[in-house]
Amino acid sequence: MIADSGRDKLVLGKTKVQLEEKFGYLLIPTEASEYLRHYYQKSSWDGRDVFFIRQSPWMVVFDHDKATTLVLIKGC
């Protein structure tokens, strides 16, 4: 998805159920790797409704059960 210029359209506005249908399972921060969990805890999104797409570095932020932000976690 990194090189996909339409990646936001794949995620934003979708519900968790829709994203699971497209990508498979989603992880809550406590289920994610230590690296991803650490990034989340130090970010401005700490305490927000977020999920990670499988074991990937993609974090999805939800507001009112819809994906509103797609974050690529790298280099922290």
Image: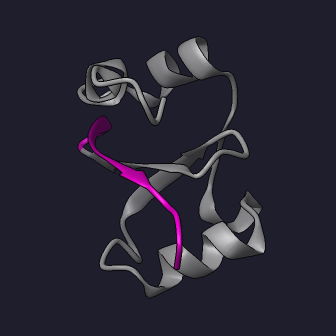
Residue 11 horizontal/vertical position (percent): 36, 27
> Horizontal and vertical percent for residue 56?
65, 45
Q: Residue at x 34, y 71 (%)?
A: 45
State the residue lying farthest toward the bottom: 42
Q: How many marks?
A: 0
Residue depicted at x 75% and y 75%: 34
Q: Nearer the viewer, residue 36 or 5?
A: 5
Residue in the picture at 48% in, 29% down: 1
The answer to if 74 sits in the magenta stretch is yes
Quarter assignment of residue 36? bottom right
Does residue 45 lie above or below 59 as drawn?
Answer: below
Left or right, 14 with respect to 56, comes to left
Q: Is residue 27 above or below residue 24?
A: below
Residue 1 magenta-highlighted: no
- Residue at the farthest top position: 21
Q: Position of residue 18 (x, y in %)?
A: 46, 16
Which range of residues does the magenta coloring cover? Answer: 64-76
Vertical relation: 43 (above or below) 53: below
How is the protein colored in the picture?
one colour
Residue 17 shown left or right of residue 31 in the figure: left
Q: Which sits in the foreground, 71 or 19?
A: 71
Q: Quadrant of residue 20?
A: top right
Image vertical order of residue 62 relative to residue 5, above or below: below
Q: What residue appears at the point 73 percent right and 46 percent down from the top-left corner?
A: 55
